Amino acid sequence: MREALRGLTTRGRSFLAAAAAAAVSAVILGEKDLLRVAILLAILPLLAAAYVGRSRYRLACSRSLEPHRAPVGASARVVLRLQNMSRLPTGTLLLEDRLPYALGSRPRVVLERLGARQASSVAYTVRADVRGRYEVGPLVVRLTDPFGLCELTRSFPSVDRLTVIPQVHPLPNVRLAGEYAGAGDSRARSVAVHGEDDAATREYRRGDDLRRVHWKSTARTGELMVRREEQPWESRATVVLDTRQYAHRGEGPTASFEWAVSAAASVAVHLRQAGYKLRLVTDTGIDAEAAEGGEGILLDHLADVRLDKRGDVAQLVEAVRRRSDGGLVIALLGALTTAEAELLAGLRGNNATCVAFLIDSSTWLNLPPESRAEAGRAHGAAALGLMRTGWRVVGVSHGAKLPALWPQAARGSQGFAWRATMAETVGMGPGVGHGPGRVR
């Protein structure tokens, strides 16, 4: 009851003050009727406090998110279900769900009345334009009487989490040469048919099953040979995300880094749906693999990834090579120097096919013509440095759309026009890209 009295609203306290004034006036003037008015004024807020306090701890609440994982710019639906567990009806209920600033203002919903054992559901939508993980809740319920004389607040401790993942763009189906790697003991290599079993023979070893004897090979070699059944070849890909802070420009959802994160998510989902065994690597320590149908794990990592002031290309190369087993490497790279481009040659080992989406992050800034030309030359030099080491390079500038760029990843050569343009940009003259080690 004490807590209920502390919950008296301004209106309820005004009633008590008026009752006290009327009581004093009745005593001074000797008016019994005025005393009755004072008693009535005092009883009303007390009854309201008793009414609200009785239903104080007899409410149950549950919350559901639909869905729990939503892309940037999409809406999620939050459903609140409130049940009155007591035998008495409640008064007016004001529901307020606490939300982080990125999800918008706190929703407020009014429920006029909940009868005995009655439940009611309300829903609202949230939308986030910035990826990340956000807590929804706790729910705050304000209980009031019909006259607004008393108000009590109850906070439910339950909290749900909404994961806002990067926007995923559907990509066209293209053939990426060199994407297959073996799952058996042999070295990785490219094959023409996806999933084809590779049968080979070896010398008989004690304990081998005689049913595996390969008689044609035995007759040809003169020694007992057995069939070695290797695991089928499978598609393997590594998505590399450059998180170096100085390599990206722009702020907020339109920054070059956000373009790279969205592109990494789109590529990861596209390759997983195509049957690839996928791995995501960044220089911030993220090294995750997607199990069967588990691209959601990678998307959750991409929801959390942030720029790193201490990131460098050497660290990124080392993270990829730590468990590299060939296949396809697709890198989303920010601005590079020629020296950093040469370091990325280390990812070409083990017959890996490497494709770089090289972001010209300077196009995310408003630069004067001289600075723009200098930034363009640096970007062209980095592209040539990658191409010399066997990388396929796809240039990315501000406003570029990944679905339109994706078919270029399937091309074994960037074309003479691209190389001539790069050569002219960096001042290397004609014939660049035709010498040893150039991409043809």
Image: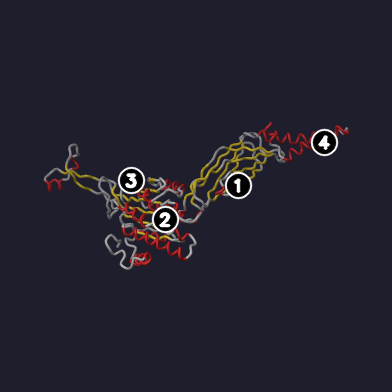
Few, some or many residues within 10 Å of mark 1 (<14, 14–19, 20+): some
Q: CA distance from mark 3 to mark 4?
A: 85 Å
Label 1: which residue? 107
Circle 3: element type: loop
Q: Position of residue 221 (x, y in %)?
A: 12, 47
- Mark 2 or 4, closer to the camera: 2
Q: Which residue is painted at 35% across and 47% down in the image?
A: 318
- Whichever of callouts 2 and 4 sits on the residue coming sooner in the sequence is 4
Q: Give the residue at the far bottom of this rendering.
A: 430
Percent position of residue 303, x then y: 46, 48
Residue 289 is marked as none
> Within the image, what quadrant is residue 401 found in?
bottom left
Q: Earlier in the sequence, mark 4 or mark 1?
A: 4
Q: Which mark is residue 22?
A: 4
Label 3 vs 4, first from the N-terminus: 4
Task: Return the residue at label 3.
Answer: 323
Q: Secondary structure at mark 2?
A: loop
Q: Are marks 3 and 4 in contact (CB under 8 Å)?
A: no
Instruction: Return the residue at label 2.
Output: 334
